[in-house]
């Protein structure tokens, strides 16, 4: 193995198709950063969050084994922005990853290009959130450490104040990362004093947003935490490889815009009544949006679409799933098992590159849903 990168709390080496991180800050009883990251990697299970394959102890402290990625976003940019397609993939991956971490009751506190890993895929580039050394459990009203993260990407309330801040500090950082990925240059540079001296002027100098990507960034790069986008709002902003404005254009020509929230509300009631995991519900909503972008639909087919998406989402987040006859029963025979199977096949073909591409779908599941030619 050969050393490839030295970070703030460890040295990463690569070889045999994996990366191994040795925590250089470990001192006898342990480093809080190392303990936090190992616990986070062990807990989090999401396709856009770095997965820990194994961990153990060596003479100088713990070592974790991680998937090998081509580079991080900082290396990938190299002074130039990403392509439009890569920007959408980045927004989808990072927003869903941060939203997942928040739903688990934690926040990252150091989202930056160095902590977003890149790996090429058949349908584009996969971006993965990494480095959870500053990740802590969120407790409303609790006082946290000031200046714990990289000043260039830290929310204003993290650089000064009483240390009482919340989940929305991550969305400020995400907004800056998305902007840098689009333009190729950061909004501000330097250490804490330099950032505080130039931040107001830099934010005020951002042009009025003209595109969907710019509007997404503008809602995150807001100095007032209360006015900044929340986890729920940001999660709804992406669905597959597209931004929400594209979906609105499709919906306006096919369905009444008020019908989409009605469908989501019904899906939420089904999940609550039948104890379907919240992660499955969120993923199913993302699948619905993605399908409605890819093909036209009618009001009569929305319930069938919602059930198909819930069924597929359960395979990602749960070990026990409902089967066709269960959904036929739930909907009081609104469709047949054959119609349900055909819809699941159609939805799977649309969402598989995004939802299943990075997971390696179980062979039995794939055989059930992929049409054999």
Image (tube, helix red, strand yellow):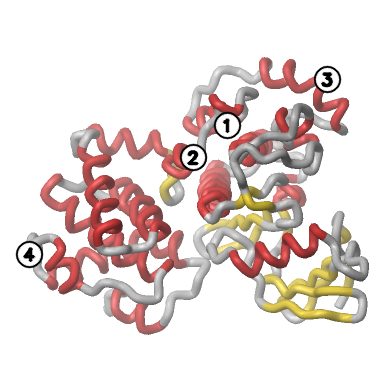
**Residue wearing tag 4:** 333
Q: Are marks 3 and 1 in contact (CB under 8 Å)?
A: no
Q: Is residue 173 above or below residue 15?
A: above
Contact flag, marks 3 and 4 (Cβ < 8 Å):
no
Q: Nearer the viewer, residue 35 or 197?
A: 35
Where residue 280 appears, as percent x and y from the top left, is 38, 60
Judging by the rendered image, the residue that carries numbered circle 2 is 234
- For marks 4 and 1, the one nearer the N-term is 1
Q: Nearer the viewer, residue 192 or 137?
A: 137
At a point 92% along the width and 75% down the height, the residue shown is: 60
| Residue at x 13%, y 67% (from the top left corner) | 328
Q: How many marks?
A: 4
The residue drawn where x is 9% and y is 68% is 336
Between discs 2 and 3, the one toward the N terminus: 3
For the residues labelled 3 and 1, the Cα–Cα distance comes to: 20 Å
Which tag, 3 or 4, sits closer to the chain's start? 3
Mark 2 and mark 4 lie on one chain; the one further toward the N terminus is: 2
Quarter of the image for residue 158 reads top right
Residue picked out by circle 1? 220
Asked if the residue at tag 4 contacts the one at tag 2, i.e. Cβ–Cβ closer than 8 Å, the answer is no
């Amino acid at each position: 193995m050969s050393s490839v990168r030295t970070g703030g709390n460890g040295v990463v080496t690569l070889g045999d198709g994996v990366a191994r991180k040795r925590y250089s800050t470990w001192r006898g009883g342990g480093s809080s950063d190392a303990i936090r990251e190992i616990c986070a990697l062990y807990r989090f299970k999401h396709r856009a969050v770095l997965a820990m394959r194994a961990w153990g102890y060596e003479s100088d402290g713990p070592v974790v084994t991680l998937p090998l990625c081509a580079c991080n976003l900082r290396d990938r940019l190299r002074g130039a922005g990403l392509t439009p397609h890569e920007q959408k993939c980045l927004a989808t991956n990072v927003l869903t990853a941060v939203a997942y971490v928040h739903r688990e009751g934690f926040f990252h506190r150091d989202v930056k290009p160095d902590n977003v890993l890149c790996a090429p895929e058949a349908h584009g580039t996969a971006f993965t959130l990494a480095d959870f050394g500053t990740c802590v459990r969120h407790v409303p009203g609790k006082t946290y450490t000031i200046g714990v993260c990289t000043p260039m990407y830290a929310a204003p309330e993290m650089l000064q104040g009483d240390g009482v801040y919340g989940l929305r500090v991550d969305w400020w950082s995400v907004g800056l990362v998305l902007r840098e990925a689009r333009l190729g240059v950061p909004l501000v540079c330097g250490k804490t004093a330099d950032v505080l001296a130039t931040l107001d002027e830099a934010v005020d100098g951002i042009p009025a947003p003209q595109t969907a990507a710019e509007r997404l960034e503008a809602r995150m790069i807001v100095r007032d935490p209360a006015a900044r986008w929340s986890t729920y709002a940001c999660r709804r902003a992406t669905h597959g490889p597209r931004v929400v404005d594209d979906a609105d254009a499709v919906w306006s020509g096919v369905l009444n815009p008020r019908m989409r929230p009605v469908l989501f509300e019904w899906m939420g009631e089904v999940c609550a009544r039948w104890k379907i995991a919240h992660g499955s519900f969120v993923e199913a909503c993302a699948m619905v949006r993605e399908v409605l972008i890819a093909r036209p639909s009618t009001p009569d087919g929305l319930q069938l679409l919602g059930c198909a998406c819930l069924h597929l989402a359960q395979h990602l987040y749960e070990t026990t799933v409902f089967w066709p006859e269960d959904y036929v029963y739930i909907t009081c025979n609104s469709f047949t098992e054959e119609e349900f199977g055909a819809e699941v096949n159609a939805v799977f073909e649309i969402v598989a590159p995004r939802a299943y591409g990075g997971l390696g779908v179980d062979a039995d599941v794939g055989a059930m849903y992929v049409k054999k030619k």
